[in-house]
Amino acid sequence: TLADLPKPDQAAQHLEMARFLRRSSLARYAADLFERVLKLDPARVDVRRELGETYLALGQKDKIRELFSGPVHEDATLENLFDLAQFMIAQELFVEARSALRARLERHATNLDIRVMLLAIERRLGNRSGGIALIDKARALADTGARYHKWLESAVEFHEEFDSQDKFIEQELGRLEQEDGKWTERRLQRRMAFADTAVKIGAIDPAVVMLQNDLASDPPREFRTAIRRQLIAAIEKERSQVALVQQHLEDLATEEPQLRHEANARLAMLHVALQRVDLAMPLIEKVDILQVNDATVLRGIESVHARQGGDRRKILAILQRLTALDPTDRGAWENWMSAQAASGDEEKLRRVIRQLLAGV
């Protein structure tokens, strides 16, 4: 009988049946079996979540709160813990989610992801002091460019809740400026992450000042290119900075010949934005689209060609390039196919369709 089986096997059998019943819209019976699974194997927090979802389907919100009020088993994987915490947050069980994450943090004090999720909870709870303490402790764990970027974005999101993001950005820039001034990949990544995040929230001035100072510090050539491109991205939509954008694009084209086509394409789009198509077209004519990797810029060039009645072959080439940059962009494929159909070249159209049907 089932009762004679070892506990792990009993749990597996109950779980299989519970999931079947849940799929069959028999949630009440599924809930009973999920409960048995948890008694047999308390570490299965993934099952705990499934039981919570089943209670939710049954409208038993009191049972959901009771289910998540206790501690999470210490053997639960971090992945399952995060998944469970996300469900708890979605159900606005913030205090319960915080308790579960704090308990795990005691054993994994250097885990940045736990602190980031806790910070999101403190934001939802309006706990400003608790969140700031988390931000300060988590910064020391942001030891790579990617981890720093994650930390910074979560910290900014927290401060936005209290309308203090501009002050935080200013303070963080001060901390960056106090770090070792020797150029390393780690330093570059942190500063690029800072500029990117600052620009996203509209704090353009601090990012621009930092990047301009970085360029003036005579960084290594490969770093200078990255800094200049980041600076261009920060100011290219600011009409008051048109002259500065143009200068940096021209400098980029001069310093890095392999980026000349991309720089000229961006400069052409700048002229288009200023309604100077007469200045844009000579630059566009010189651009090798295979050397441009920015899909937004390519779409802009295609649009200008279309409005100006440009060479259909160039338009087709741009549309094809867009599909190469992002093969999953169905819109780009549809545009390319439509353009091929309008060109009357049935053989090329069939080749495009075959490419699409091949699994793109």
Image (cartoon, grey):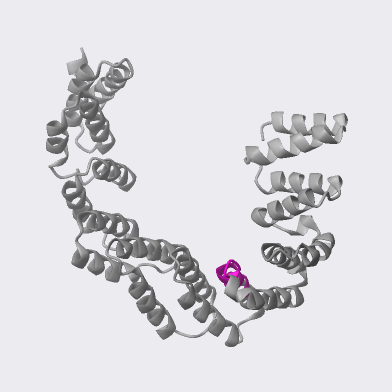
Tell me which segment is drawn in magenta. Answer: 228-238
Type of secondary structure dominating the magenta stretch: helix
- Identify which residue, 308 or 12, lies in the foreground: 308
Tag count: 0
Specify the quadrant that holds the C terminus. top right
Residue 254 visible within the image: yes
Percent x, y for residue 317?
80, 47
| Image: 289 above or below 149 | above
Q: Residue furthest front?
A: 275
**Residue drawn where x is 41% and y is 69% of the image:** 143
Please give left or right for residue 318 compared with residue 99 in the image. right
Percent x, y for residue 157?
35, 60
Percent x, y for residue 262?
72, 64
| Image: 247 above or below 339 | below
- The question of residue 234 being in magenta is answered with yes
| Image: 63 above or below 14 | below
Specify the quadrant that holds the N terminus. top left
**Residue drawn where x is 19% and y is 36% of the image:** 42
Q: Quadrant of residue 358?
A: top right
**Residue drawn where x is 15% and y is 45% of the image:** 71
Residue 227 visible within the image: no
- The question of residue 269 being in magenta is answered with no
- Identify which residue, 274 or 166, lies in the foreground: 274
Q: Quadrant of residue 8?
A: top left
